[in-house]
């Protein structure tokens, strides 16, 4: 079963040096990565992702999908033109950008189909939709968050670091249950791009 949060109880039940292996990811995408965590004596566990994974989520951590009509009922949005193609930004392939973008666009989900992408905020009613036609992408977004701008910033962050695969990222679960994702080494936590201003 895939998890969105590694239970602290798993670490407490693992002796120091023991290994916990679990498919882990964010709500942003159904694409996860296989985390291989080594338990430490201080109640934490840390390790790299070993590759992409896709499993049914643990029942207690499944997400109730946002109601589209509840988000877009006002109809008010602003439009943004971008040079990025939806197909590049939201690679649907196994091990594609879905899991990686989720690290940098927190508390959000997305749905991509037939060249159209919808994004929904999970903590408010922010939403965005983007479509690429004839090489031009137009995005409409509404709400306190600029979700399209967040996704675009996350994608550019990823490109600027050489388009790292999931195996260059890792996860540390602290004794208080906080999760920290890092790139290459635990000393390099993944930083979220600054949210676009309203």
Image (cartoon, rainbow, N blue to C red):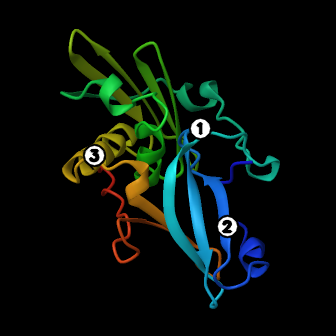
Q: Is residue 53 left or right of residue 94?
A: right
Where's residue 177, x and y in %? 65, 74
Task: Tell me the SS state at disc 2.
Answer: strand
Nearer to us: label 1 or label 2: 2
Residue at the bottom extreme of this rendering: 42
**58 and 55: which one is in front?**
55
Q: Residue 45's image quarter?
A: bottom right
Q: Mark 2 or mark 1, which is nearer the start of the sequence?
A: 2
Where's residue 198, x and y in %? 32, 47
Q: Mark 2 or mark 3, which is nearer the start of the sequence?
A: 2
* Location of residue 109 with respect to 112 vertically, above or below: below
> Badge 3 is on which residue?
163
- Residue drawn at point x = 33 percent, y = 25 percent: 86
Callout 2 environment at 10 Å: few (<14), some (14 to 19), or many (20+)? some
Residues at marks 3 and 2, CA–CA distance in whole angstroms: 27 Å
Where's residue 197, x and y in %? 29, 50
Q: Is residue 117 left or right of residue 198?
A: right
Q: Are marks 3 and 2 in contact (CB under 8 Å)?
A: no
Q: Mark 3 or mark 1, which is nearer the start of the sequence?
A: 1
> In this figure, what is the number of numbered marks?
3
Callout 1 environment at 10 Å: few (<14), some (14 to 19), or many (20+)? many
**120 and 161: which one is in front?**
161
Q: Is residue 188 left or right of residue 45?
A: left
> Badge 1 is on which residue?
30
> Badge 2 is on which residue?
20
Where's residue 133, x and y in %? 27, 11
Q: Is residue 2 left or right of residue 198?
A: right
Nearer to us: label 3 or label 2: 2
Q: Are marks 1 and 3 in contact (CB under 8 Å)?
A: no
- Residue drawn at point x = 42 percent, y = 18 percent: 116
Residues at marks 1 and 3, CA–CA distance in whole angstroms: 20 Å
């Amino acid at each position: 079963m895939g998890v969105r949060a590694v239970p602290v109880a798993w670490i407490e039940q693992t002796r120091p040096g023991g290994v916990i292996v679990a498919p882990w990811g964010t709500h942003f995408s159904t694409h996860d990565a296989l985390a291989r965590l080594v338990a430490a004596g201080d109640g934490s566990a840390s390790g790299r992702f070993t590759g992409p994974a896709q499993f049914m989520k643990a029942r207690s951590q499944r997400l109730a999908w946002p109601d589209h009509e509840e988000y877009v009922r006002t109809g008010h949005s602003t439009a943004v033109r971008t040079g990025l193609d939806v197909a590049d930004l939201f690679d649907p392939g196994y091990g594609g950008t879905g899991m990686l973008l989720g690290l940098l666009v927190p508390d959000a989900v997305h749905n991509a189909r037939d060249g159209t992408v919808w994004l929904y905020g999970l903590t408010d009613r922010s939403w965005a939709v983007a479509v690429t036609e004839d090489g031009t992408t137009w995005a409409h977004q509404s709400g306190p968050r600029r979700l399209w701008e967040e996704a675009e910033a996350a994608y550019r962050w990823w490109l600027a670091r050489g388009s790292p695969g999931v195996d260059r990222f890792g996860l540390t679960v602290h004794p208080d249950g906080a999760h920290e994702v890092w790139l290459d080494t635990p000393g390099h936590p993944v930083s979220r791009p600054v949210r676009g201003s309203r």
